[in-house]
């Protein structure tokens, strides 16, 4: 079997510090803000089953033990010690941590200590702009502070991320907005916003995005639920500027995301989330992503947030899926073993190390 | 292997009472109103091959015997007796029968007798509105009769269905239309319509839909050929009202339909049609649907219409596909056997019994 | 195992006459005009790996030998001799060659000689219109010359192709443009165009398309990157006119393309490109296409251009994928062997022979 080297998790978040019960744990298994229907539970999902497969053994239990048994053991150990055991059992060497989501989540430094791994920060643009707006009274102040904050962040962060730009219409209007447009939008926003509010207007989102493009750091774009092909115009507009674009969360349009990576030399696609959320189907989804993307353009991630169990599940499913998919092709004679080993190394971390300039 | 319990077929139609020849039988195998190209036949489809696999043995013939041989035997038995043998051989315990399609099809009571099973009615909104319009001269009469007909139907039916609302733009304009808008649309429609004509104007379709939502019965929505994600706005608008939405015919966008079931606690997705029409590929399509949907949100159906062969094929393909997919995951260690058995029970009927309030 | 008969490659282009080095060869492996990212290569793609699997043995080398070794051997033989060995090793009996792409590519006659096979021409409409415009000064001249050129081409060509019509908005506006509209668009175009320029205005594209529809020859439509379902309106508009429409390059929307072939008796879908570009995944993609399409409506092609290696890879992958997919279904009992053999014959060439009127 193809050996996967230690992973670079190119997009994840920190883990919750609080102790979790059945309800609070379950809430982390479904889509953000979603609730299970009466008579159903989010434990009955691929993510729930994958956690029950991979995580109990790391805490000394049988695979597939009931959720209540697992959570009792987790509380017995305490969230910190359980997190430590889980993260260290995931086989991940480097975590790139997007710090821009709400909740009491561990920051990169604490992730590194807990996991016995390397960790770097990804700065999300919308909360950064929100913090700048909280501290600024005028348009001029906001614009210069935002530029300062973005360039400042670029000194220590490994990447920027935008969660809202694609949903905010980036595909329809890909270019950098003009200075007059930006000033009007900022002025309107500062006049109406409540403290803590994040920018949502398309002009504001694009201004933040294009400011980040100017730094040359890679830019991670959360895709919405639509086909990413229309993002080709933004890819064309940023071609040759030296900034890599990394498409996150392509599923179920991961084949289109993969296609874009072949069309534009600076566009990359993420393998994450789809693995953890599809569980027993991770190999099938990975295989689809490997159809059209050049193998140098795909990056592993867990997409995990809140539960260290999700960091584990992402890593284990990727490891197993990669072995099964590439191993199958070697077995069929379609691929040479040395090519499979090389591609495994690229996807697991070498591509990410090159894109983010990691050692 | 995982045992599938007797099925609840949560969306099908009655069967044709007339004797069928090669041409009339073949016409039921393709899409509605479609014709095969010269030199080709709809028997050469996955549906055709699946019928030839599963149905001849129920009539005492070899699997895969030629269509002409099969149809000769079918005529020898007579349509009624053949239908009886086929339906009883399908392993279905309950049929939910959408009675709103044209053609000389058996109603629920006759389906129950013929199949030796339980049957309940699903009332389709467009023909209901058409019948009301046939009997009414004024806007006031129509509106009060429609409300009466919908609430009257809700006393005996288990669900409503709309075949046209999604194609009629429900995703673009999800809200209930205002009274003035409705009155104008009804007035215009009553002035121009010919007897028997079904409503097609978006305002009429949405008015019928929102009237049905008021009854609290589950509402089945036939998806069009586009990605169902934009239906999220209608799902958001009906959230918390107590009415379940069941998405029908998601293929080839079944992954998006599955995703919607996770995002909204009152949204469910159908497994039907895709199974019968994809035949030898049913397990692959089922596996894709099981990626993102919580397992409590998927409902088996055959989607069959006209030919009892399609009720058989839907049931047999589902049974086989479910066993293969879940059995494979158990064999890999990805799922525990007891979980697989539990999920099989949910998909085969327990979810439907809960959603439709069946015993 | 199911035997595949000699193939009819229903859509390909000629091969390059020049000798190729690593860089010029690699450029033919990615999407048109795309470049690999720094630190990556288009040899690390499914297409690259598939070439390394299937082609070296035809030139006397080991499968999967390094690209540099393969290209050295290729230069040693010379492009002409290498091309001869490759094409003759592909198992293709008939090539339909689209001659409307730029580059020093072998025309059909030379393909036939080199491959020891039959070859026919497919005439692409946009370059044909461009050549007519180069030679005409007035709107009248252009319109009558274009009609003459199209009808003239129809005497020897087996099909027309349009690469731009779908991207040019055919789905939005499917009908034939009116004479006034056409005259205005031609007049504008002749006034501004530079020699050699191809038509891009939607009215010009549709005029060329509808002129070709008038000849009754099959019309091949390159799909864009969007879902082809909206092309249903063009299919409806051309229904019953006697012209077959063949959808090219459906991936990743091949399931929608397959669905269209069932809805319209004159619509066909291509299996090509997706096979060569997805390599080890060709069987999976083929199986998806076989879900909804009637088996009489699918046509093999390689979609190859420039490199005879791509003609080989398309043919070999199709052969292997077909054997694996149909063989699997026969092994499961889902299909009868004689049906599988019959369907293999249809897809490999019999359908194409019927559609294009080949002997």
Image (cartoon, coloured by chain):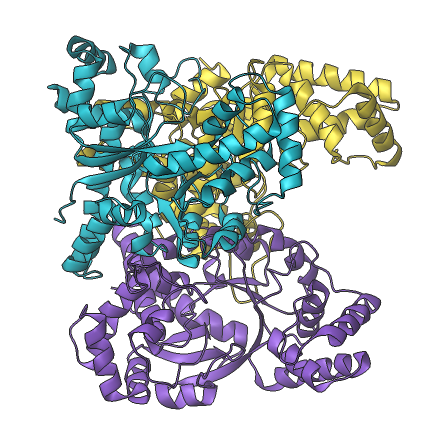
Chain colours: A cyan, B yellow, C purple
Instruction: Identify which residue is drawn at 65% across, 21% down.
Output: A191
- Report the front residue among B258 and B41: B258
Q: Is residue B239 above or below residue B134?
A: above
Q: Is residue C76 left or right of residue A289?
A: left
- Report the front residue among B78 and B125: B125
Q: x, y (%) of residue C317? A: 31, 65
- Report the front residue among C34 and B69: C34
Q: Is residue C285 left or right of residue C101?
A: left
Instruction: Identify which residue is drawn at 32% across, 52% down.
Output: A290
Q: Is residue C326 left or right of residue B79?
A: left
Instruction: Identify which residue is drawn at 44% across, 17% down.
Output: A35
Quadrant in which the C terminus of chain B is drawn: top left
Q: Quadrant of residue A204?
A: top right
Q: Is residue A270 above or below residue C327?
A: above
Q: x, y (%) of residue A214? A: 46, 45
Instruction: Identify which residue is drawn at 82% across, 35% down.
Output: B195
Q: Is residue A259 visible?
A: yes
Quadrant in which the N terminus of chain B is drawn: top left
Q: x, y (%) of residue B240? A: 55, 14
Q: Is residue B123 left or right of residue B183?
A: left
Q: Is residue B305 visible?
A: no
Number of numbered discs overlaid on the protein picture: 0
Q: x, y (%) of residue C161? A: 57, 72
Q: Quadrant of residue B103?
A: top right
């Amino acid at each position: 079997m193809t050996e996967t080297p230690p992973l670079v998790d190119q997009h994840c978040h920190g883990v919750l510090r609080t102790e979790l019960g059945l309800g609070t744990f379950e809430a982390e298994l479904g889509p953000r803000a979603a609730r299970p229907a009466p008579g159903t539970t989010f434990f009955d999902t691929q993510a729930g089953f994958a956690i029950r497969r991979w995580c109990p053994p790391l805490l000394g239990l049988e695979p597939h033990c009931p959720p209540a048994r697992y959570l009792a053991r987790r509380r017995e150990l305490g969230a910190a010690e359980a997190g430590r055991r889980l993260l260290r059992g995931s086989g991940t060497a480097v975590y790139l941590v997007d710090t821009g989501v709400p909740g009491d989540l561990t920051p990169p430094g604490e992730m590194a200590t807990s996991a016995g791994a390397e960790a770097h920060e990804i700065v999300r643009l919308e909360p950064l702009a929100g913090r700048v707006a909280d501290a600024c009274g005028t348009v001029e102040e906001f614009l210069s502070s935002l530029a300062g904050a973005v360039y400042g962040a670029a000194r220590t962060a490994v990447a920027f991320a935008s969660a809202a730009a694609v949903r905010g219409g980036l595909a329809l209007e890909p270019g950098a907005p003009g200075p007059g447009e930006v000033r009007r939008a900022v002025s309107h926003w500062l006049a109406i916003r409540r403290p803590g509010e994040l920018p949502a207007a398309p002009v504001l989102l694009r201004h933040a995005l294009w400011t980040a493009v100017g730094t040359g750091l890679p830019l991670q774009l959360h895709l919405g639920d639509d086909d990413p092909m229309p993002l080709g115009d933004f890819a064309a507009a940023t071609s040759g500027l030296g900034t890599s674009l990394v498409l996150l969360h392509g599923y179920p349009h991961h084949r289109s995301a993969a296609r874009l990576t072949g069309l534009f030399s600076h566009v990359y696609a993420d393998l994450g989330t789809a693995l953890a959320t599809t569980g027993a189907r991770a190999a099938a989804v990975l295989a689809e992503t490997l159809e059209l993307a050049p193998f140098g353009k795909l990056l592993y991630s867990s997409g995990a947030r809140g539960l260290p169990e999700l960091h584990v599940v992402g890593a284990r499913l990727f490891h197993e899926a990669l072995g099964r998919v590439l191993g199958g092709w070697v077995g069929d004679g379609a691929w040479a073993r040395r090519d499979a080993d090389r591609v495994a190394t690229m996807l697991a971390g070498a591509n990410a190390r090159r894109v983010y300039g990691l050692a």
